[in-house]
Amino acid sequence: MAKLKQLLMNVLIIHAHENPDSFCSTLGETTKTFFENQGHHVTYSDLYAKDFDPVGGKRDFKTISEADHYKYAFEQITAYNNKTYKENLLTEMKALEEADLLVFNFPLWWFSMPAILKGWVDKVISYGFAYGGEYGIYKEGRFKGKKAFLSITTGSPEIYYTKEGVHGRALNDILRNINGGILELIGFDVVSPFIAYAVSRITHGERNKIVVDFKSYLKNHFG
């Protein structure tokens, strides 16, 4: 029997590392190359290169409503309905809307994501567009039927992320706020993350081995 032709996807990679020579950036570029080589359409949103402003506020909108009480979430749904978002945010929203696969690529900071990526979440995964209004959450989320995963580098070694380790918890437990509280909440089917541990503490050869492992991870899940 002939092999079924692979369905092509729109892949959106949100990259959040300032240094293009970092190992985190290497993982981002590896992801981009992998999916492009398979014929998928890839949008690579490099937040630092774009100088993305992470602070949500009135400047996100072309106009402000005449409501008696200013509330950011209300302005978001109003801007979405009236098409009065600033163009840079509309571009990010369009890429997210079209994506079949969403990738967050970032270094773990304080058990979470860098502020620039959290700001992207606050401003782009917005009320009225990604949830609320006509859209539900979790199984009824706007992005149900689509996939997402995290690609992360850490400063601490893997042994730290155990119940017996320095941090006293597994990294998957730490990532629950992102996987469950953001991605699953708006409907994404979340694939297990890829974690590159202690990348600034290991040898060049060990980092090369991680890249090989990452390529195997991508092939196993999306090849």
Image: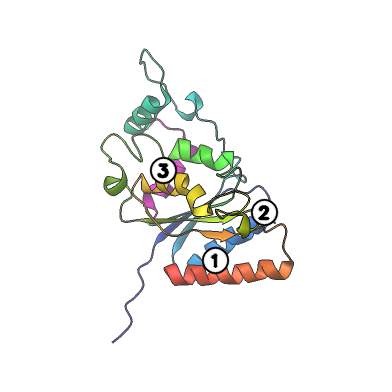
Q: Position of residue 168 (x, y in %)?
A: 57, 49
| Residue named by callout 1 | 33
Left or right: residue 73 compared with residue 217: left
> Which amino acid does the dot numbered 1 rest on?
Thr
Does the magenta portion include 98?
A: yes
> Which amino acid does the dot numbered 3 rest on?
Gly
Residue displayed at 31% across by 35% down: 132
| Residue named by callout 3 | 181
The main secondary structure of the magenta stretch is helix
Which quarter of the picture shows residue 81?
top left
Q: How many marks?
A: 3
Does the magenta portion include 199?
A: no
Q: Position of residue 30 (x, y in %)?
A: 57, 64
| Residue named by callout 2 | 20
Left or right: residue 173 compared with residue 109: left
Q: Do labels 1 and 2 touch, CB within 8 Å?
A: no
Label 2 element class? loop
Viewer-nearest of labels 2 and 3? 3
Asked whether residue 44 is in view, the answer is no
Residue displayed at 62% across by 59% down: 159
- State the separation of the CA atoms marked 1 and 2: 15 Å
Q: Mark 1 or 2 closer to N-term?
A: 2
Label 1 element class? helix
Residue displayed at 45% across by 72% down: 220
Q: Position of residue 66 (x, y in %)?
A: 36, 15
Q: Residues within 10 Å of mark 1 (few under 14, many from 20)?
A: some
Q: Do labels 3 and 1 touch, CB within 8 Å?
A: no
